[in-house]
Image (tube, rainbow, N blue to C red):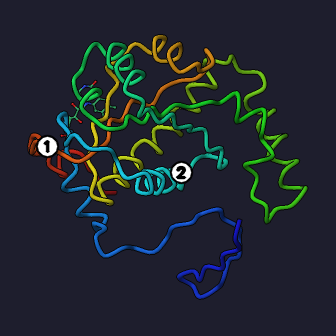
Amino acid sequence: MTNATVSTATGSTVTGSTNATVSARSATDLSTSEAINTRVTIRKFVQEPIDQNDLREILELASRAPSAWNAQTWRFAVVQNPEIKARLQEAAYGQPQVGSAPAVIVVYSDMEDVLATAEETAHPGMGDEGRATQRQTFDRVFGGQPVAVRGQWGLAQANIAFAFLMLAARGKGYDTSPMLGFDPQKVRDLLGLPEHVQFAGLLPIGKRDEPGFPQHRHATERLVKFY
Ligand SMILES: Cc1cc2nc3c(=O)[nH]c(=O)nc-3n(C[C@H](O)[C@H](O)[C@H](O)COP(=O)(O)O)c2cc1C
């Protein structure tokens, strides 16, 4: 944990604590717009292990994602073991990108863990009062909800981290393949995850060994209304 003092646009400063070990941009990093524009789904990867420091840095960047009440519902299961990866590929209906990638990051939401540890996500700058408020808020909002319903809320937060993960990977020169085509129960069973967890997706990650399809998207005008 280190203390960080950040200057805001208005010139004031905010001090908080962070366990981030990365922040500076390295010479080989892509800009945000480069990462967005060059990210395409890759299903065939170069057959080499992923650099473990890069992998950690990408996971750490993804964990910087924002979430409502700072709940940080996302969890990452990183599969590199070839046997487990083969079984994960089976659970994903044999889709080849799972076997081709040197690592597959399973992104899931664990809302029950979030609720059990509510105090952890209160900002330390808010002290005991902040921790008590976080606990009360979570109990009030989620305490009466069925596990599956609050699990959906948790999943909405985890999807933000899923997107951060793809862009962090691309920013560091890696490629990914977002996937929802898998049997969630098989993945829970394989990884020993509790029944209540919900999946943002599988993310095979590595270096591209194919160009992928060019992006095809709606024109911005089709999507946006200005008021
Ligand atoms: C949440 C999500 C789930 C996806 N699931 C699969 C999948 O199971 N199998 C697959 O081949 N592609 C999958 N895709 C890839 C999409 O088909 C792809 O992102 C989309 O066609 C846009 O192409 P692009 O990613 O190359 O820009 C998924 C993408 C997302 C974002």
Residue beneath the point at 71% across and 70% down: 16
Please tell me whether mark 2 sits on a helix, a strand or a loop.
loop
Q: Is residue 161 left or right of residue 70?
A: left
Where residue 73 sits, quadrant-wise, is: top right
Where is residue 24 shown, x and y percent of the image? 45, 75
Pointer 2 residue Cβ closer than 8 Å to ligand 1: no
Q: Which mark is residue 21?
A: none
Q: Quadrant of the N terminus?
A: bottom right
Where is residue 8 shown, x and y percent of the image? 57, 80
Compare marks 2 and 1 and give the one earlier in the sequence.
2
- Amino acid type of the residue that numbered disc 2 sits on in the rendered structure: Ser
Please tell me whether mark 1 sits on a helix, a strand or a loop.
loop
Q: Nearer the viewer, residue 80 or 199?
A: 80
Where is residue 209 shown, x and y percent of the image? 13, 43
Look at the numbered discs 2 and 1 and tell me whether their residues touch, using CB distance below 8 Å.
Answer: no
Q: Is residue 102 above or below residue 126?
A: above
Q: Is residue 148 above or below residue 210?
A: above
Q: Quadrant of the C terminus?
A: bottom left
Mark 2, mark 1: which one is toward the viewer?
1
Pointer 1 residue Cβ closer than 8 Å to ligand 1: no
- Amino acid type of the residue that numbered disc 1 sits on in the rendered structure: Asp
The residue indicated by pointer 2 is 63
The residue indicated by pointer 1 is 209
**CA gap, disc 2 and disc 1:** 27 Å
Q: Is residue 205 left or right of residue 154?
A: left
Callout 2 crowding tier (Cα within 10 Å): few <14, some 14–19, many ≥20: many
**Quarter of the displayed picture in which ligand 1 can be seen:** top left
Residue beneath the point at 18% across and 55% down: 38
Residue beneath the point at 56% across and 37% down: 75
Q: Nearer the viewer, residue 130 or 222?
A: 130
Callout 1 crowding tier (Cα within 10 Å): few <14, some 14–19, many ≥20: some
